[in-house]
Image: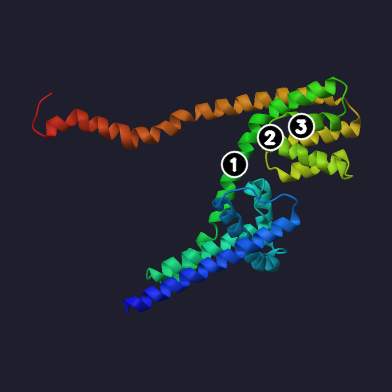
Amino acid sequence: MVWLLATFYGSCLALVCLWYGEMESGWLIRQRFGSDTAFEGNQWDLLVLVVRGLLETWGEVLWVRVYSSGTGQDSRRRLRVAGYPRNMSIQELWGWRLVLSIVGATYIYVSQGGFFLACLGGCLCSRLPYLWLASAASKREAAIRRALPGVLDLLVICTGAGLTFDAAVAIMVEKTQPNPLIDEFQQVLHHMRMGDSRQEALRRMAARNQQQDIRSVCATLIQADQLGTSITSTLMLLANQIRISQAHRAEAQANQAPVKLLFPLVLFIFPSLLVVLFGPVFLGGTF
């Protein structure tokens, strides 16, 4: 019996290795024909790329059925707000949802959880990629909030030197270190070069972001372009206003600190202090 199990598991392992070898070779062939440069990376990088490609293939099966539904629109919105972290596509997102739901349901069912609990667990596990996207979106919004005043100051300097808004954005994208806000302005520049007007490119930027500061900047720039007012003075006022709002936001967070410190004080520090002070009394000692 032991030999039969060993043979079975060995055959399964050999089939998995053969399958991965074929997937790896196929990916390298497609990459070589689709690009002029050869693949540069170690074996782990290649494994990650092959697995992501496989997940994208599996997710395509589900995505073609839900892309026009409300669930598909919600997934696309979440991925757009998160900024497509690690170049994740919508098909790969649904591939992760499929794999995690199958793994979670199988684990609960094998653990004698019952069919209903297995289905519930699979549904909950399929929502785990959304939690990761929410975390990525919050980090991206924080990075945009930190970089926004400095980027506006750079635009003020460029436009004050006589450059147009398009040329100022191009210089800023070229000279500034990459960050989520620079990526957004790079997409604005790309859309303008593809033929969209400045107002349409800024409207798309506002639609991609849920942060109020970005939307106010886009709305103000659109209004300045419609009325023909000076962009330099508009950007200067925006930078000062955003700094003031960020200072108020920091003060509000600082005022919340005493309330947040109340829970660790009550749960961890006060009990330990009471044990140190009154512990000898209950043990029969003296102060």
From the viewer's perspective, tell me whether residue 88 is left or right of residue 200.
left
Determine which of the numbered discs, if any, sits on residue 178 in the image.
2
What residue is pinned by disc 1? 138
- Name the residue at 59% across, 41% down: 138
The kind of residue on which mark 2 rests is Pro
Q: Secondary structure at mark 1?
A: helix
Which residue is outermost to the left? 284
Q: Is residue 202 visible?
A: no
Q: Would you place residue 238 above or below residue 206 in this image? A: above
Q: Position of residue 13 (x, y in %)?
A: 46, 68
What residue is pinned by disc 3? 174
The kind of residue on which mark 3 rests is Glu
From the viewer's perspective, tell me whether residue 117 is left or right of residue 272.
right
Which of discs 2 and 1 lies nearer the camera? The answer is 2
Quadrant in the picture for residue 210: top right
Which of discs 1 and 3 lies nearer the camera? The answer is 3
Q: Position of residue 120 (x, y in %)?
A: 48, 66
Q: Would you place residue 249 above or below residue 97 in this image? A: above
Q: Nearer the viewer, residue 168 or 32?
A: 32
Q: Nearer the viewer, residue 272 or 127?
A: 127
Q: Secondary structure at mark 3?
A: helix
Q: CB atoms at circles 3 and 2 under 8 Å apart? A: no
Q: Secondary structure at mark 2?
A: loop
Mark 2 surroundings within 10 Å by alpha-carbon count, few (fewer than 14), some (14 through 19), many (20 or more): few
